[in-house]
Image: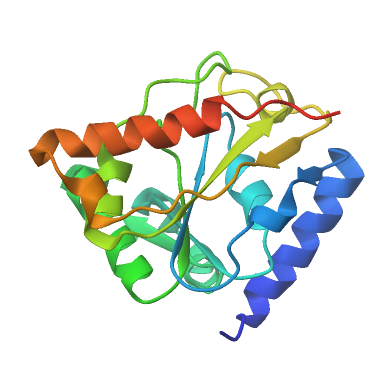
Amino acid sequence: MEIKPLYQLGHSLFKFVGSTFFSFRVVNPEWMIEEGPAILAMNHQSYLDPPMAGITCERELYTLARNTLFKTRFMQWVLPRINVVPIDPKGGDSTALKLSVRILRQGYATLIFPEGTRSIDGQLQPAQPGIGLIISKTLAPVVPMRIFGSYEALPRTGKFQASPITIVLGEPIYFTKADLEGGREVYQRLADRVMAAIAAIEYVD
């Protein structure tokens, strides 16, 4: 699939920013899924996480963001061109889930944070069932990823500072219809499985 020019520019820019300010590294890049529908599932520590996740792969990546980011004409023009999709927080999680399913069914990759929001203390949080629902609707493979250092670089309640950031990829998880048995509780079970794979990823020097 052809990459949008502005997305390609942003991709190159953040690669430069990552290497210049954060000594950014990707460990196990061979486990990235570069074709077809895929969910990149990563822990969430900082506003830096989406662009850092984006430069772990060479394909376009879609992310969801609150529609409040689209207030100005400039942002309304820029954000869709770098694959940021607006969601209405008042619409609840269902809006984000439906958009994610649609993106995956069209054969694209999307970034999902199973925890649902940024960690307050940098520690891993329990998974929300949303990613499990998306998996059940699409059977899209999941690339578990764990980011280290973005909390130190830009914590939720602190100031920016240049510090090393590393993303370590885990082995992709492939699902079958047999994984979907069990009623509605299957959503949380799938989400917990993904979160456990993220938690199992260790930092690599």
Q: Position of residue 29 (x, y in %)?
A: 73, 53
Q: Position of residue 105 (x, y in %)?
A: 32, 72
Choose between 117 and 171: the one closer to the eye. Answer: 171
Q: Position of residue 74 (x, y in %)?
A: 54, 67
Task: Answer with left or right where residue 104 lies relative to residue 129.
Answer: right
Q: Quadrant of the C terminus?
A: top right
Res. 35 image quadrant: bottom right
Q: Residue at x 58, y 48 (%)?
A: 50
Instruction: Say above or below: 180 vs 125.
Output: below
Q: Residue at x 31, y 54 (%)?
A: 87
Task: Answer with left or right where residue 42 lies relative to residue 160.
Answer: left
Q: Residue at x 36, y 59 (%)?
A: 86
Q: Is residue 55 visible?
A: no
Count the marks.
0
Q: Is residue 38 visible?
A: yes
Choose between 35 and 88: the one closer to the eye. Answer: 35
Res. 152 image quadrant: top right
